[in-house]
Amino acid sequence: MRDTFNVKTRRGFVIGGLLLLMSLAFIGSVQAATSLSGLEIHWLTYMREEEKLARDVYLVLYDKYGLTIFDNISRSEQTHMDAIKTLLDRYGLPDPAADNEVGEFTDPDLQSLYNNLIVQGSTSEVEALKVGVIIEETDIDDLNAGIASTKRKDIKTVYSNLLQGSVNHLKAFVSNLAKYGVTYKP
């Protein structure tokens, strides 16, 4: 009888412990979202869509011109989107890019920017590369603002990594423009 009690007791403790851990994890994620500042929430949600804008523009321009740079960097931008999505999930924030197709944005300013960049980039390969420069310069500025808005190490680390990626992307676009005889002017 004692062995039966011990097995049932242990099983109850294990199940109870698991339920407790699950509830603490849920409470932790709810508290995490509420502990973010308004600026931190703004930059996380905005950067998710800004990275999507970069990816979407590069996908469209790759389809139009077949330039390898757009294919390669669009893949990198997907990685950037995924990194921000991980932070959104960690802090229990909704994903503004969820269920949006290529070229669809929740933020009306980003929607307008996307539309304008597609028009500009559709005029020539050089203009398409200039669009890449515009996107990366904008991304660099916004990532710096995002870094300045938080003291959270995980957010700063992701933004800093994305910033380095954007600097590399900018260099690649500038290099490609040089092949067309165009000198970069910030």
Image (tube, rainbow, N blue to C red):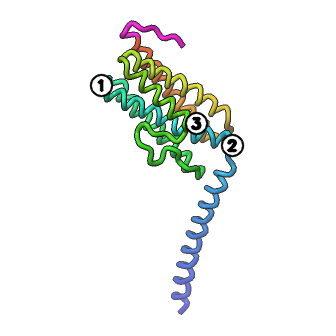
Q: Secondary structure at mark 1?
A: loop
Tag 3 and tag 2, C-beta contact below 8 Å: no
Q: Residue 133 in the image: x percent, y percent?
A: 47, 20
**Mark 2 or 1, nearer chain start:** 2
Kindly identify the amino acid type of the residue bearing the numbered disc 1: Gly
Query: Along the line of sight, which residue is nearer the eye, 143 or 123?
Result: 123
Crowd band around label 3 with a 10 angstrom C-alpha radius: few (<14), some (14–19), many (20+): few
Kindly identify the amino acid type of the residue bearing the numbered disc 3: Thr
Query: Along the line of sight, which residue is nearer the eye, 57 or 17?
Result: 57
Q: Main secondary structure of the magenta part?
A: loop
Q: Which residue is disc 2 drawn over?
A: 38
Q: Residue 83 in the image: x percent, y percent?
A: 50, 41
> Which residues make up the magenta segment?
178-186
The image quadrant where one finds the C terminus is: top right
Kindly identify the amino acid type of the residue bearing the numbered disc 2: Gly
Query: Along the line of sight, which residue is nearer the eye, 13 or 174?
Result: 174
Is residue 64 a member of the stretch shown in magenta? no
Crowd band around label 1 with a 10 angstrom C-alpha radius: few (<14), some (14–19), many (20+): few
Query: Along the line of sight, which residue is nearer the eye, 151 or 94?
Result: 94
